[in-house]
Image (cartoon, helix red, strand yellow):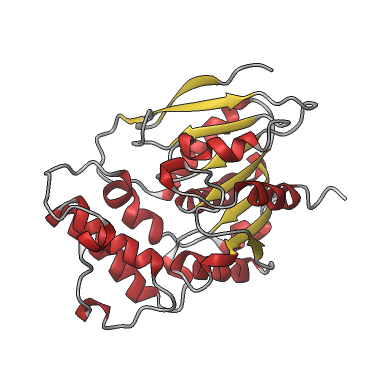
């Protein structure tokens, strides 16, 4: 089997690095795995379950090996979508299949809305867009507060608020700001500010990702087959509620996947899901239109 090869691609305002794992099976559509701000290393386990297919992973702009060259402090999903379009075109393999999770799913929806010709099937797993949930204004406020806390107080206090956001069951009340701020120590996080402000989640992508409104007319008219998914253990959380709303906006059923928001993880970043079961369901979702 050929070894994984790392490639470099210059785009507008960034230099991307991506990995191509040649498959052992017959030539077919590549499978592109997209996270954000998670980098390619988060898909190591999941990629191993698709050894028969050519699998492509990448580091989004401003993350890990992919440097920003424009000096911007924040990134919009449309910019990620442009990066992804250029990456797929660079592969020269026609429309690809895509599995995209979390912020990567938001970016993939932006990609399909603009360039559906580049994606055959998209499985969008728990896209955290606040624009589609009933408590939209409250969630947008929470996300803006996470970002502001990061700029003001540093990583630990902001990450504690982010984790509280992702773990909360049900809608946020209008008076969410009156609730006591979570204690970083309760999550094993430092309360002290180390002065750094380079975190791609809390700084670069927090507001752009969560405030993105999917272009439902463009998505419904795209040639891409779109499957929106959420983890069975994620029910009631913000990202899962957003997935339900995105599926409703597309007029398609929500696909239930094993485990939680990181269900495909097999120990990456110290997190465990159910990667074998997740990969089995993902394969079925990707092959769902092949009869």
Q: Is residue 106 above or below residue 171?
A: above
Going 33% across and 54% down the picture, which residue do you hit?
Answer: 206
Q: Is residue 28 left or right of residue 269?
A: right
Q: Position of residue 42 (x, y in %)?
A: 48, 40
Q: Nearer the viewer, residue 254 or 82?
A: 254
Going 50% across and 50% down the picture, which residue do you hit?
Answer: 272
The answer, for residue 176, to whether it is visible in the render is: yes
Q: Position of residue 84 (x, y in %)?
A: 51, 37
Q: Is residue 255 left or right of residue 212?
A: right
Going 44% across and 78% down the picture, which residue do you hit?
Answer: 170
Going 33% across and 61% down the picture, which residue do you hit?
Answer: 163
Q: Position of residue 136 (x, y in %)?
A: 40, 74
Q: Give the total of numbered labels.
A: 0
Q: Is residue 120 above or below residue 160?
A: above
Q: Nearer the viewer, residue 40 or 85?
A: 40
Q: Nearer the viewer, residue 81 or 198?
A: 198
Quarter of the view holding residue 152: bottom left
Q: Position of residue 24 (x, y in %)?
A: 74, 24
Q: Is residue 281 above or below residue 86?
A: below
Q: Nearer the viewer, residue 43 or 33?
A: 43
The answer, for residue 147, to whether it is visible in the render is: no
């Amino acid at each position: 089997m050929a070894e994984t090869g790392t490639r470099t691609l210059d785009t507008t305002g960034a230099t991307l690095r991506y990995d191509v794992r040649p498959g052992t099976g017959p030539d077919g559509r590549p499978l592109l795995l997209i996270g954000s701000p998670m980098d390619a290393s988060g898909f190591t386990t999941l990629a191993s379950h698709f050894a028969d297919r050519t699998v492509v992973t990448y580091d989004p702009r401003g993350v890990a090996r992919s440097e920003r060259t424009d000096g911007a402090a924040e990134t919009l999903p449309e910019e990620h979508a442009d990066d992804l379009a250029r990456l797929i075109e660079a592969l020269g393999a026609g429309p690809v299949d895509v599995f995209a999770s979390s912020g990567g799913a938001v970016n993939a929806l932006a990609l399909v809305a603009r360039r559906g010709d580049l994606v055959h099937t998209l499985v969008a797993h728990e896209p955290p867009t606040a624009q589609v949930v009933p408590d939209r204004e409250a969630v947008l406020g929470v996300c803006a507060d996470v970002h502001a806390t990061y700029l003001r107080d540093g990583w630990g206090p902001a990450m504690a608020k982010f984790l509280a956001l992702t773990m909360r069951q049900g809608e946020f009340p209008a008076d969410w700001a009156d609730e006591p701020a979570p204690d970083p120590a309760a999550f094993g996080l430092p309360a002290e500010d180390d002065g750094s402000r380079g975190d791609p989640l809390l700084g670069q992508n927090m507001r752009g990702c969560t405030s993105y409104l999917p272009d439902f007319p463009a998505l419904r008219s795209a040639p891409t087959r779109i499957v929106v998914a959420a983890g069975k253990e994620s029910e009631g959380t913000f990202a899962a509620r957003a997935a339900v709303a995105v599926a409703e906006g597309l007029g398609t059923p929500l696909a239930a996947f094993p485990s939680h928001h990181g269900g495909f993880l097999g120990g990456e970043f110290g997190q465990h899901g159910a990667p074998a079961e997740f990969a089995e369901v993902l394969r079925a979702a990707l092959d769902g239109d092949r009869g």
